[in-house]
Image (cartoon, rainbow, N blue to C red):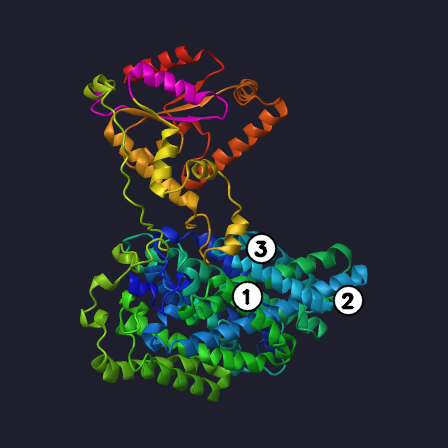
Amino acid sequence: MKENKRNTLISDDVLPVTSRRRALSGLGFANIWIGMAIVISVFSFGASGIEKMGVIGVASATFVANLIIAFIGSLTGDIGVEHGLSFATYLRAPFGTSGVHLPSVARGIIASCWFGINTYIGSTAINYFTMALFGIDNWFLWFVIFAALQVINTMLGIKAIDKFSSFAAPCIILITCWMFYKVNNLAALQNFSILGYHPAQPSASYWFVTMSANMGMWAALAADIPNMTRSLKAPMGEKNWFKRNINNWIPQFATLPIIEAFIAIIGAISFKTTGNWNPVEVIQQQATGVTLVILLVMVILAQWSTNTAANLVPPAMCFTNAGARWKLPYKLAVIIAGLIGCLVQPWNILNQLYTYLGYFGSILSAIAGIMICDYYIIRRRRLNVQDLYKSDGQYRYHGGINLCGMAALIAGTILANIFSDFGYFFGFPAAFIVYFALMKLWYLKKFPQAEVESNYDNEYLGISAGRDWIIPGYEKQAGYDIIPEINVDVSTAEYTGGKEYEERTGNRLIITFGRQYGSRGRELAAILAKKLDIPFYDEDMIKYTSKALNISESKVRNVEEMQRSELLDLLTAGSIYAAKEYDASTSDKMFKIQSKIILQLAKMSPCIIVGRLSNYVLNEAGVNTIDVFVAANYEDRVKNVEKRGNMSRVKAENYINKKEKNREYYFNYFSTYEWGKPEYYDLCVNTSSMGLDELADHIEAYINAQ
C-alpha cells in the first residue's frame, strides 16, 4: 500500500470505477449523447452534399456513418463498463505506461480545441442577441463568461453533467424540430421539393466522402467513450455482452445516427434555400423578439451540452492520466483543458475546420483500430488491471513504450492522410492489422501478457465475473472505505427483558424509533425501555462515535444530521465522481461507524435504538426489528420545543423547520428509503393523541401480540 501511495501512475481520478460508484443510467447517457450530437459543423456536411446526392443521399450517408460510429463506440465502451477504466488508463495496455501519453495527450489537446470552437460559436450567438436587444457588442466578454460557466459545470462532476443533460436534451430536440420547421417553410416559399430534389451533377463517390467526414467528426468519442461508460450502471455477474452493456449500446444507437441525419437534412435545406449552410445565421437574419431568444437558447444549450461531455471530460481525463505522477486532480485538469481551448484562438481554427477535421479523424481512427484489436482480439476483453498501475509491470514493455502500438498508430495515421477523403476506412484497418501482426509475431513472445498466458482466464474479467477492481491502498476511493473495528464497552447484565419475546418468536427484541422533531419520541422510547426492562440508546451513540473517530463529542453533535454545501464540496474536493454517492466526508464516515455501532448493540442484547437510520441499517443487515415512528401535531411540537429550549415561538418554529430539513436530508442521503414514509415502519404513533405512558402500553401490547 505504501508503495502504491508513491506510485507515479496512480491518482484518484485514474483509478477503476467500481460498481458502488457508478451512478449514470442508460437514460442519462442517452441525454448526454443527445446534447453532444448537436454540433453546428454537422450542418455543413448536409450543405456540401445536397448538390452531389440530394437530401436522401445526405441523410443516408450521415445515418450510416453514425451507425458505424455507434457500433465502434459500443465496442470500446465495454472497456469502461467491464473494467471501469478511463480511455487514457486503458491505453497503457496497447501503448505502454509511458507511451500512452502521446496518443492520449494528443487527443486531449484536440478535444480542448473543440471546446474553444464550440464556445466561440456560442459566444457569437450571445453577442448577436445582446447587440440586437441592448446594443452591447463584446463577443470576447461572452466568450470568457461562457467558457467559465462550462468549466465550472464540468468541474462539478459526472452527476452535474448528467443533470444538465437531462434538462438540455429535450429542449435541444424541440428547438431542433423548430429549426426544421423554419427552414422547411423557406423551402415551401421557394417551391423547393425536399425529397423530390435531384442534383444536376450527382456523384456516387461523394456519398462515401460525406460518410467518411461524418465518421471523422465522431472518431474521438468512438475511441474515448470509456470515459463515460465507466460511470454506467451495469449488472454484476452478467456474462451476456448485450445485457451487460444495455446502458451503453442502446443510447448510442438510439441517438447519434437519428439526430445527426436530422441535423444534416436541416443544413442541406438551409443551404439550398438561402445559400447559407448555417441555419443559425439564416434565422438570425429573420428572427426578432421571442424567436431570437429561442434561437439563443438552442445555440447555448447545444454548445454547452456538447462541450462538457465531449470536449472537457475527455481531455481532463487524459491530462489527469499524464499528470498522475504529480497527482494532478480532475478539477485542475478541467481548467487546463479550458485554458488550452481559449488560448489556441478557436476563431482562427474555425476558418480551417475541414483541414483540422481531416488530421483529427486520421489520428483517432488509428487509435480506435488499435483499441478494438487489443481489447477484443489480443486480450479477449481480459486485462491485468493491477499491472496497469505498476511502472515495472507487464505493460512496461520497452522502457514504458509499446513499439507495436506506436508503429500501428503511425501507419494508420499516414495511410488515413494519404487517402484523406476516406481517412477512417484506411486508418482504422491499417492500424488494426499492423498492431495485430506485430503483437502476435513479436511482442507477445518477448513480453508475455498474463491475461493471454492464462488462456484467457476469467480472473482477468471485471463486472461480468462479479468483480470490482480495487487498487491496494485506495479502498476508500473505490467506495470500500476501511472503517476501524468498533468495540462498544456496554454492560447489559442489569437488564432482563426481551426473553419471553425471543422464546416466542425466535428473534431478539430490537426496537427502532424514528421521530419528528419535537414529538417527544425520545421520551416515549425511554418510558418503553423501562417498561420492557431493556437498554435504550440515543445520546450514548455520540459518546461511542466520538471514541471511534477520536474527535470531540461536540464535533460529533455538529456533524450529525447536518446538511453540507454540496456545491462547495464538489468544487473544492473529490474527483469527477465527487457526488453524494462517493464523497468520503466526515459525515459519511460517521454514518458508517454509527452503523457498525448499531449492529454491535443489536447483537449484544434486546434494546431500543433511537434515530440514526437504525431501522434502515438493521433491516439491510437482515436483523428482525420492530420499527416505530413517532409524530405529533405541529402546534404541540412547537410548544414542546419552546418549553424544552426556553425559546420564543418564532425561534422554536425556525428550529423545527431546520431540524426537520436536516433529518430529511440525512435520511434520504444515506438510505434508499424516503423520510417520513409510513410504509417503512411497523407502528406509527401520535403523541398528541394520548399520554406517553398510555402510548408505551399500546406499543408493549403490540409487541406481546407478535
Q: Which residues are magenta?
A: 505-534
Q: How many marks?
A: 3
For the residue labelled by badge 2, is the local secondary structure a helix, a strand or a loop?
Answer: loop
Look at mark 3 in the image and give the residue it sits on. Answer: 168
Look at mark 1 in the image and give the residue it sits on. Answer: 335
Does residue 43 belong to the magenta stretch?
Answer: no
Look at mark 2 in the image and give the residue it sits on. Answer: 137
Residue drawn at (40%, 56%), measured in percent from left and top?
Answer: 232
Q: Is residue 450 above or below residue 170?
A: below
Q: Nearer the viewer, residue 39 or 478?
A: 478
User: Would you say the residues marked 3 and 2 are in contact, meaning their CB atoms lie under 8 Å apart?
Assistant: no
Tell me which label, 3 or 2, sits earlier in the chain.
2
**Residue 161 screen position, x and y as percent:** 52, 56
Q: Nearer the viewer, residue 104 or 271?
A: 104
Q: In the rendered structure, which amino acid carries the disc numbered 1?
A: Ile
Task: Residue 204: tell me if it is visible.
Answer: no
**Residue 219 screen position, x and y as percent:** 47, 73
For the residue labelled by badge 3, is the local secondary structure a helix, a strand or a loop?
Answer: helix
User: Would you say the residues marked 2 and 1 are in contact, meaning their CB atoms lie under 8 Å apart?
Assistant: no
Asked where in the image residue 691 lies, by quadrant, the reply is: top left
Q: Nearer the viewer, residue 569 or 223?
A: 569
**Residue 124 screen position, x and y as percent:** 70, 68
Q: Mark 3: give few (<14), some (14-19) or many (20+) Cα within 10 Å.
A: many
Q: Is residue 486 left or right of residue 307?
A: left
Q: Is residue 287 left or right of residue 481?
A: right
Q: Is residue 201 left or right of residue 437?
A: right
Q: In the rendered structure, which amino acid carries the disc numbered 3?
A: Ala
Asked where in the image residue 696 lies, by quadrant, the reply is: top left
